[in-house]
Image (spheres, rainbow, N blue to C red):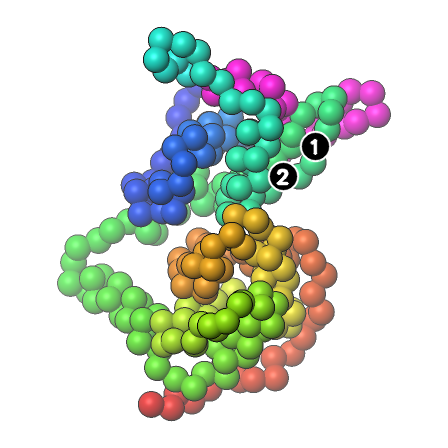
């Protein structure tokens, strides 16, 4: 695959959690974006009995080669990451929902997929999200933000998701409260992701939380486990839901609670 050309990099990166992580993680993620298969052509690699097909948004490379590719000069000497450090950083990016490690092959390397690659590298995605300044568009954005922040309700969906959150993640006392902000975030998650996949929303949410629980990065700090951190943006909600759908077989379901629930002030 050619390394000529360019990649799209959104200015939203400055507001993204990734920007606040270790600078090596940012370097590694941008490297993966650059080296991922950017075309519709698929590439098949084989060695012995192992065969791997690399599709759009995917990448195949040994950890040793990644170390060589990402080496840089500092204090007048060449600095390169160890393969164990790269493996750890890839796991962190996977735990954060940015990549999926498809397979590890001793003969061919690590096969990984960029989550939401098309959204990152599709001009139309940025056009839809482009910041606009006319009054009507500002008002639309303001209403969307207000809907999440001020969803004051005894919403059965948010309450049910919160009960599952407490059960699966089992936080140590003192237990956090279901605040209005958390209700808003959980409601958005239910309406926009969990209830649109033909699966039982609560089963799917359990699968999402199992992914969180398996992440040492998230379980090390309570703040990272809270809904307002896990699901605060559409990108993160989509990422967690997608990973859960891939890794679990949720049961088809007809919602038992109407989405047209009434709001109690």
Question: In screen coordinates, is 241 left or right of 142?
Answer: right
Front residue of 23 and 106 = 23
Q: Residue 252 sits in which quadrant?
A: bottom right
Question: Is 194 colored magenta in this rendering?
Answer: no
Image coordinates for residue 149, horizontal then vertical, percent: 31, 71
Name the quarter where the N terminus is drawn.
top right
> Is residue 42 visible from the viewing direction of this image?
no
Position of residue 26 relative to residue 254, above or below, is: above
Residue beneath disc 2: 101
Residue in the image at 39% along x and 13% along y: 73
Residue in the image at 36% along x and 36% along y: 9
Badge 1 marks a residue whose secondary structure is: strand
Residue in the image at 50% along x and 56% along y: 238
Front residue of 224 and 115 = 224
Classify 10 Å Cα crowding around label 2: few (below 14), some (14-19), many (20 and above).
some
Question: In screen coordinates, is 174 left or right of 215?
Answer: left
Q: Residue 139 sits in which quadrant?
A: bottom left
Q: Are marks 2 and 1 in contact (CB under 8 Å)?
A: yes
Image coordinates for residue 115, horizontal then vertical, percent: 53, 44
Residue in the image at 55% along x and 77% along y: 163
Position of residue 216 relative to residue 222, above or below, is: above
Residue beneath disc 1: 104
CA gap between label 2 and label 1 equals 8 Å
């Amino acid at each position: 695959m050619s390394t000529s050309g360019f990649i799209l990099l959104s200015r939203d990166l400055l507001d993204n959690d990734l920007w606040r992580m270790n600078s090596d993680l940012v370097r590694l993620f941008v490297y993966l974006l650059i080296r991922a298969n950017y075309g519709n052509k698929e590439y098949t690699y084989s060695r012995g009995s192992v065969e791997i097909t690399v599709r759009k948004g995917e990448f195949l490379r040994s950890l040793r080669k990644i170390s060589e590719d990402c080496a840089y000069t500092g204090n007048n000497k060449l600095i390169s990451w160890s393969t164990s450090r790269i493996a750890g950083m890839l796991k962190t990016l996977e735990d954060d929902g940015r990549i999926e490690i498809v397979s590890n092959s001793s003969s061919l390397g690590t096969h990984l997929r960029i989550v939401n690659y098309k959204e990152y590298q599709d001009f139309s995605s940025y056009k839809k999200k482009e910041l606009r300044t006319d009054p009507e568009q500002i008002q639309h954005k303001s209403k969307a933000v207000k809907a999440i922040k001020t969803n004051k309700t005894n919403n059965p969906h948010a309450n049910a998701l919160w009960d599952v959150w407490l059960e699966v993640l089992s936080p140590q006392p003192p237990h956090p409260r279901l605040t209005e902000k958390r209700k808003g975030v959980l409601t958005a998650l239910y309406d926009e992701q969990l209830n649109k996949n033909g699966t039982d929303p609560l089963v799917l949410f359990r699968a999402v939380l199992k992914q969180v629980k398996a992440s040492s990065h998230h379980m090390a700090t309570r703040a990272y486990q809270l809904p307002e951190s896990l699901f605060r943006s559409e990108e993160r909600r989509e990422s967690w839901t997608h990973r859960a759908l891939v890794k679990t077989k949720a049961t088809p379901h007809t919602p038992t609670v109407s989405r047209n629930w009434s709001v109690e002030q």
